[in-house]
Image (tube, rainbow, N blue to C red):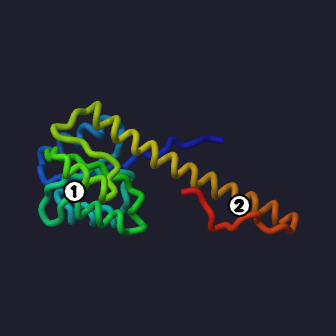
Amino acid sequence: MTHEPPPKPVILVADDNPNNLQVVSSMLTECGWQVRVAVDGEAALKSIAMQAPDLVLLDIHMPKLNGYDVCRTLKADSKTADIPVIFATAVSEGFNKLTCFELGGEDYITKPLQLEELRARIGIQIEKVFCKKQLEQSYAQILQLKRQVNALSGDPLPYPEAEHPS
């Protein structure tokens, strides 16, 4: 039985500065991740709606929709609420950090970005995403096996199928 390597994580980088997009995109590609870019918050939401990334690296100050609005929109939608958001911004005041976390952001990093720090922070979030996916797949397999065993024995499931780890 051969196992295919896991797909490369997809990271959406949203920043209105073309130089930042180019530098960050290069840094993340060097780390082995697939990178998509968006030049503003509106473009970020359109990109996410077309294909959800594994993580969003989001600038706060952007035209059309700022990073706060993008995060608020993602976290309000059940289809995108679990996508981790890391804010990457030159703004470093405590109020902005607190707002990022209150909106559901998983992390906050200040510019200029350092490759090692960026890799570590994104790596932690990506690992959490893939661990959660593995857990959900394992849970689904366990439920399927229980259904098969119960079908053979005629016993109902010992607990409601609606229960599941989150």
Q: Quadrant of residue 60?
A: bottom left
Q: Could you say where residue 30 lies in the image, as x and y percent from the top left?
A: 30, 35
Question: Does residue 105 appear left or right of residue 161 in this picture?
Answer: left
Q: Could you say where residue 99 lies in the image, as x and y percent from the top left?
A: 24, 55
- Tell me, for residue 108, which label it has, or none: none
- Mark 2 is surrounded, within 10 Å at the Cα level, by few (under 14), some (14 to 19) or many (20 or more) other residues, namely few
**Marks 2/1: CA–CA distance:** 40 Å
Of 63 and 100, nearer the camera is 100
- Mark 1 is surrounded, within 10 Å at the Cα level, by few (under 14), some (14 to 19) or many (20 or more) other residues, namely many
Mark 2 touching mark 1, by CB under 8 A?
A: no
Position of residue 35 relative to residue 118, above or below, is: below
Q: Kindly identify the amino acid type of the residue bearing the numbered disc 2.
A: Gln
Q: In which quarter of the image is the N terminus?
A: top right
Q: Considering only order in the chain, which callout, 1 or 2, is on the residue closer to the N terminus?
A: 1
Q: Residue furthest top?
A: 116
Q: Could you say where residue 118 lies in the image, as x and y percent from the top left?
A: 28, 37
Question: Does residue 6 appear left or right of residue 152 in this picture?
Answer: left
Residue carrying label 1: 38
Of 87 and 52, nearer the camera is 87
Residue carrying label 2: 144
Task: Report helix, strand or loop for mark 1.
Answer: strand
Q: Quadrant of residue 150?
A: bottom right
Q: In which quarter of the image is residue 63?
A: bottom left
Q: Residue furthest right?
A: 153
Task: Report helix, strand or loop for mark 2.
Answer: helix
Q: Which residue is drawn at 18% across and 65% down?
A: 65
Q: Which residue is drawn at 72% across and 64% down?
A: 159
Q: Kindly identify the amino acid type of the residue bearing the numbered disc 1.
A: Ala
Position of residue 26 relative to residue 155, above or below, is: above
